Every structure is written in C-alpha cells, then in structure tokens.
Image (cartoon, rainbow, N blue to C red):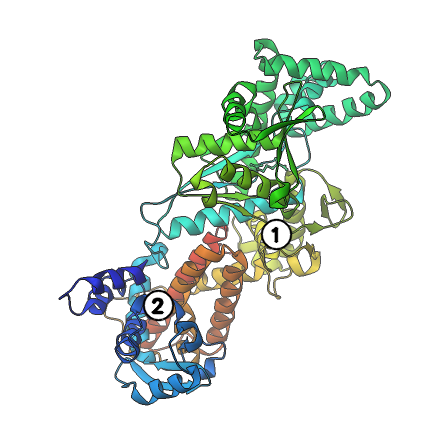
Amino acid sequence: GVASWISAVEAVPGVKGAVELVDAANAKVHQLDVFRYEIIKQVSALTGASGDAIYPLLEEPRDAANGDLSLPLPRLKLPGNPVQIAKDLATNFKTNTLITKAASAGPFLNFSINREILRDRLLPSVLIQESNYGRNASGFGNLAIVEFSSPNIAKPFHAGHLRSTIIGNFIKNVLESAGWATVSINYLGDWGKQYGLLAVGFEQYGSDEELERDPIRHLFDVYVNINRDAEAKPEIHDQARDYFKRMEDGETDALGLWQKFRNLSIVKYKDIYARLNVSFDIYSGESQYSLNQMRNVLEELNDLSLLKPDAGALIVDLKQHKLGTAIIGKTNGSMLYLSRDIAAAIDRQNYYKFDEMFYVVGSQQDHHFRQLFKILELMGKPWSEHCHHINFGMVKSKDGNMSTRKGTVVFLQDILDNVKGEMHEVMKKNENKYAQIEDPEMVSDLVGISAIVVQDMAARRVKDYELDWNRMLSFEGDSGPYLQFAHSRLCSIERKAGFEVSPSVDYSLLTERQAHDLVDIISRWPDVVRDVTTTLEPCNVVSYSLKLSHAVSSALDVLWVMGQERPLAEARLALYRAARITLGNALRSIGLKPLERM
Ligand code: ARG
C-alpha cells in the first residue's frame, strides 16, 4: 500500500522528501492523504515513528467535535506514557495552512484540517475521477478467487445462498476497487447420489417441455416426488445408487441426462443473477471433482500417512487439532463433500496460482472449512493460510427458507418477484411521480432488490437477522429505497439545472456548514474502500451510504440550486454532482444499480 511505499522510499539513503513524492502521486486521487502526509511528516520527525506505522492509525475521530483526523497514541507503541506523549506532541506540532489545530485529548492527538483546502482540492478531483473515485492500487498484481452463491441443483435456493450471492459479489467488487484481479466461481452442488435419484425420478415424472420452460422449478418438483416415493419403496434408493455409479464411471448416457439438467439450470440461474447485477467467471461444481480427479488426493494423503480406515470410511484424524475426525470417503470408493473441496482447492491453486481465496458460505459450515484448511495445511500446502472462509449468520424464519409476507418460498425468483410487486404497489400510491417513470417494471425491480440487499447488509455479517418487511420496503427509514431515492434526487437536480459545471467553477462560494459537512463525508470514501478491503464487511459501506445520504438531504434543504445566481448555482451543482458520483460508487460496490429516476 501507500504506507509501505513511503517507508520503502525512506529506506533509501539520501532520498529526501519521500512524503512529498508520495503526496504528489497519491494526493491526486485521495485528498485526505494530503493532510495525513503533513501530519506524518511532523509526527515522524518528533517521535521517530515511521510513516508506515502512523499512516493507518490516522482515522476519523468518533466525535466530530474532536477534529478531522485522530491519532490514538497507544497504538503507536512508543516508549513512555501515551497521555504525556500526546500532550508534548500537541505543544510541539507546528500548525500551518494544511493542519490548523493539534490538540491532545487523553491518549489521543486530534487534528483539524483546513476545510477550504480540502473542498477546493476534493471536488474537482471527484468530478474528474467519476466512477474511479475511491479506487486504490494496493492490490495490484494480486489475484483473488472469490467463490460464492453455490446453490444445489434441484434443491431450494435458500436464504443462505442469497446472502452468499450478494456478499460474495460485494467482496469481488471491493477487491477489484483495490486493484485486485479476481476470478468469481459458482461452485454448484451438482454431484452425489441425489443426482442419481433425480435421474430415476425424471423417468417417472419428468417432462422435457417443462424442463426447457423452467428447469429449476421442474427439477425441484421431480426431486420432491421421487423422494416421497422412495420413502415407501426403499429399492428406489438402490436404483439411484446404481445410476450414480454409472455417472461416476463416466457412462455417456447416464451423464447425458445429468449434463442437460445442469446446463439448463445454469441458463436459468444466469437470468436471475443478472437481475441481481451478479455474474460469474466460472460455473464449476462438485461434479468437476469426481472419482478420477480424487485419486491423486487420496494417494497424497496416503503417502503422508494421514489416511486411516475407520468403520467403513477413510478418515483423517484431526482430534489433536480439536477438529474431530474428517471423513474423506467411504471404503466402497465413493467420495464426499469434503474430499471434493480438497481436490477443488488444490486444482484452483495449480491452475490460477491465486494469492488469496475466499469462500463465501454461511456459518453452519465453519467446522467444514476449518477441517478443509487444516487438512490442506497437513498436506504441506503453504497456501492453505491464504484460504479464507467468509462466513455469515442466518436469516431467521420458521424453517430456514426464504419467506415473503405471504409465506415461504423456495425459489429466488419468487422472492424477487414478490418484493418487486410490493414495491410496485408502493410506487403507484404517488400518482404524479408514478406517471413520470418510463419503465415502472424495471424501477420497481431495482428498488425491490435494493431493499433486500441493504436490509441484508445492515449489520455485521456474522449476525443472524429476521426479515423486517415494513422496514425493508420503507422509503423513509434507513433502507435501500431511501438510498436509491437520495441518488435519484441528486440526478434530478442535475437534469433540472439545465447547465453544465464549468472548469472555472468557484468553490469558495461553498461556505455553509452543510456544504463543508458534505465535503467531509465525500472525502472519506477512499478510506471506506481501503477499510472494507480488509474487513470485508458490507455494513461499513451501507452505513457510509446512509450517512452520505443524510448529509445530502440536510444540504438540499438549505442549499438550493434553482433560482440562485449562476456562479453559486454552479458551485452547488458541482457539490451535488460529487455527492452523486460518490453515492453511485458506494451503491455499485454493494452490487446495486443506482437509479436516475424513481
Ligand atoms: N453447495 C453448498 C451448499 O449449498 C455450498 C458450497 C460451498 N462451497 C464449497 N466450496 N464447499 O451448502
């Protein structure tokens, strides 16, 4: 990152003014860093601490009354009493045009920055960067695999899959904003004895026509029917096993039917993902790691004496690591979920040489991933420590499935259609506005999806939550519709202004508190991007977007564009455009398409 760049330059003997060098390059895109470097220069000279150590600590104070940037001294780990050090630094720090005040508060050293300079540098820079505003280059040259969504063919797409889909998409987006190359993989549940059962069921209940029309629904129906039959007639399970055996042996006609189920399901999934603004580079799945591909893994485990027979199964004993026993396969030769994941991880490392890999899967599988990563480690794969389980809590409803106001649904499409319908009703209530919307179907769909996404991302990932339909669909509370509304209001101001912002716009006309507050929040966006690249917490972007939207709405109350003298109108318009660009970037990072009208 930038901080390590500073220390790298500083480490070269005879190179002076490293901070200025970095400033020149980085401050073009991240204005708050101009002020950070000024602080670093002096604090570094006064304490001997490196810029590398100081930079990441310079955060926004919790209470805005404490200034604009705050340095928590205990975290700098200097010898001595942090409270005293803070005091001494406050006395010795020389304020100047950039940093207008340095004051200590207990172990904190708080700085106030020159808000006029921030405003004058920030606004034109945001207008120029547009969709690039907030991006950084810290991940350049790195490749991340993000595996997410991963539903099971012929089974319900449950709320966990929906969470994985939107959180995974967010992670992919933020990594890309930090310069990472990414590969997104959808690892389908498309293999196992149950697909033998599905094939047997299809002979009985299947219809090619229905399959073409709506494969996901039809395969689910077939699956439910044949499972019910199999309860009464256990021999159906034997047929299923035989069928699956033929699939594992690679028999073309057994595989043909399965291939068709898989292909048609993917076509349908793609439509639904497109509604969510999600796409995958790779549709993979458990089927890619069938018996043949597993052989090497088994041999490797065996050579390392990790594999043990145990009551009809092959296991890896992980008790020593407090992870119980991991069942790798049955002695009859069939392999399991865990073994396929081992093979998949190795295959991905061989093929992509990824720097990091993220599995976005619910907390119910914490144990599974701990076992997986431990086994990879025991197999001597140094990259196992670069595999991460990004977990999340459950959406609580009676049976763990997704629910709408009217009841439980098993298909993602139904939940999206439902929310869209509800949104459409809400929109119709405002007749005047409704009449102006060109494509209400599209708008109600996008607003509905925003409602789902923002509700889902409102709290930290690990938290379970219960769907709150009233809150979710509200335009007023802290909701997805509220964020879209703020964005479309900003777009409408630009549309109605009827003039363009000229390059000579006079930003010094923006003097009011609301204008400075808005500038301040806009200036924080690159910090948010940087932080979420490590926390991978979408709630940070949601709370930032809400804060920004609130500041926009406070500004709009008092700082009008309409009816003002041209220079003032233009300065305000520039401010609102910068806010619109920033809010749009934030919404896109959580996977939403920002709306221009609603
Ligand atoms: N298909 C699995 C499920 O629905 C999720 C797969 C997660 N990814 C993995 N590599 N195991 O539970």
Q: Nearer the viewer, mark 2 or mark 1?
A: 2
Q: Are marks 2 and 1 in contact (CB under 8 Å)?
A: no
Relative height, residue 449 to residue 41 (above, below): above
The quarter of the picture where residue 26 lies is bottom left
Task: Report crowding for label 1: few under 14, some 14 to 19, many 20 or more residues within 10 A (C-alpha).
Answer: many
The answer to whether 479 appears left or right of 438 in the picture is right
Task: Report crowding for label 2: few under 14, some 14 to 19, many 20 or more residues within 10 A (C-alpha).
Answer: some
Q: Residue at x 24, y 67 (%)?
A: 23
Q: Residue at x 43, y 81 (%)?
A: 108
The answer to whether 79 appears left or right of 270 in the picture is left
Q: For the residue marked with disc 2, what is the amino acid?
A: Ala
Residue tagged by mark 2? Answer: 53
The answer to whether 518 appears left or right of 472 in the picture is left
Q: For the residue marked with disc 1, what is the amino acid?
A: Ile
The quarter of the picture where residue 60 lies is bottom left
Relative height, residue 156 to residue 415 (above, below): above
Helix, strand or loop at label 2? It is helix
Is 20 or 382 nearer to us in this picture? 382
In which quadrant of the rendered image does the N terminus lie? bottom left
Is 297 or 505 nearer to us in this picture? 297
Residue at mark 2 to residue at mark 1: CA–CA distance: 40 Å
Percent coordinates x, y for residue 323 in the rendering = 63, 43
